[in-house]
Image (tube, grey):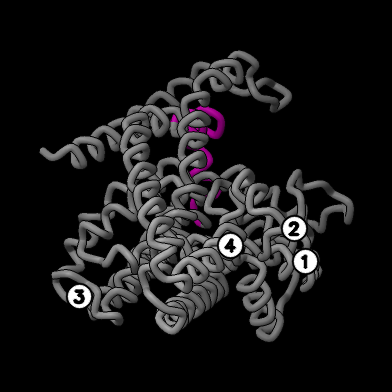
Amino acid sequence: MTKSNKLTLWIFIALVIGVITGVVLNKQYPVNADGTENASLKNILDNLTILTDVFLRLIKMIIAPLVFATLVVGVAKLGDIKAVGRIGGKTMLWFISASFVSLLLGCFLVNLFQPGHMMQLELPPVDAATGIDKAAMTLKGVITHIFPKSVIESMAHNEILQIVVFSLFFGVATASIGDKGKIIIDFLDSVAHVMLKITGFVMNFAPLAVFAAMAAVVSKKGLGVLATYGVFIGEFYFGLLLLWLLLLFVAFLLVRKRVWTLITRIKEPLLLAFSTASSEAAFPKTMEQLERFGCSNKIVSFVLPLGYSFNLDGSMMYMTFASLFIAQAYGIPMTFDQQLTMLLVLMITSKGIAGVPRASLVVIAATLNSFGIPEAGLLLLLGIDHLLDMGRSATNVVGNAVATVAVSKWEKSLDN
């Protein structure tokens, strides 16, 4: 068994043990009579989740320098601005198309299944708090947020989209100065390899983080949360399955039988993204496995970092599902035109969303009020959001992997 397969096995074992531990803790420390969380359980989970918090911090520590180094090298290696424009155009065409298909599929399914109508809730007070800060929804706020006022600040806060913008400028400038830029390219190429090596060290702690994350969510919510919201969870995961099949079918059209090799390659980052509910946690490993699959290093270094800002397919579907579910739960009718407008708004405002837990909720909170939907409706989903986030994070990995393969194929840079 290879080292990669051993790690995947340990992550899966940790996942199962975490669920079992969560069930035991949930039975041993039930909620108090007033519905509040048991103090002893809270103390145990505070200590247990140190493992998950540390692991995610280590992953976030890697993201900014890795995205910057790989994207600059990827842009510089493309050689000229024409190549950057050509490949960038193909990449953005894929991202926009995939995002719209994800949103549209989610819209179709939530209208077909009507999961919110079973709840029949009364409208909450207008000032009901959600506990989630809203993002700025003005066009000026969305556009200006894309461009960093300080790249140091962007890296400190892991603002991926802002890092991408600076990296594109830096990469094009480096390529345009010719031989003088070669030393920078070589240096950043070495930095990228060092960061990937650090990733290998950090990944050894993944099973512990997965165990802690699963034990925490199951012990707090219990397996009963799956039954309470079973219909919504089942329909959402059915939608994700359809999206997976659609993405992998496109991959099959591109690489034929090698699609099975692709699935094998990305199974470890998939499992990591699923268990930690963070697609960013899987970013370094996804990059490594796509290069092993045969994608050109310069394409992977260019497309994948962009994908984490522009191509979060699972999060796209969830935002449609969640917004319309809340509208249905409160009996708020939405016409086709309103739903289509919502899809377009979500497509624009979600760009640059971080692939970290609960990030999608921020965009949803900012969108609901614009369409007369109570923001407090998000409270309906907070209890199961982690379970839903696991599926959408894994889907984000599949979407970005297929996008990278597609662009590599179009550019004739896919090694067989």
Residue at 13 percent across and 70 percent down: it is 416
Tag 1: residue type? Gly
Tag 4: residue type? Phe
Residue at 66 percent across and 64 percent down: it is 323
- Please state the horizontal and vertical placement of residue 115, each as a whole percent of the image: 57, 63
Q: CA distance from mark 1 to mark 4?
A: 18 Å
Residue at 51 percent across and 38 percent down: it is 224
Mark 4: give few (<14), some (14-19) or many (20+) Cα within 10 Å. some
- The residues colored magenta run 215-231
Tell whether label 2 touches label 1 (CB within 8 Å): yes
Q: Which residue is mark 4?
A: 166
Considering only order in the chain, which callout, 4 or 2, is on the residue closer to the N terminus? 2
Q: Which residue is mark 3?
A: 255
- Please state the horizontal and vertical placement of residue 238, each as a whole percent of the image: 41, 63
Considering only order in the chain, which callout, 4 or 1, is on the residue closer to the N terminus? 1
Tag 3: residue type? Val
Considering only order in the chain, which callout, 2 or 1, is on the residue closer to the N terminus? 2
Tell whether label 1 touches label 3 (CB within 8 Å): no
Q: Which residue is mark 2?
A: 135
The one of 328 and 402 positioned closer to us in this rendering:
402
Please state which of the two labelled residues, at mark 1 or mark 2, is closer to the viewer: 1
Q: What type of secondary structure mainly makes up the magenta span? A: helix
Q: CA distance from mark 3 to mark 2?
A: 40 Å
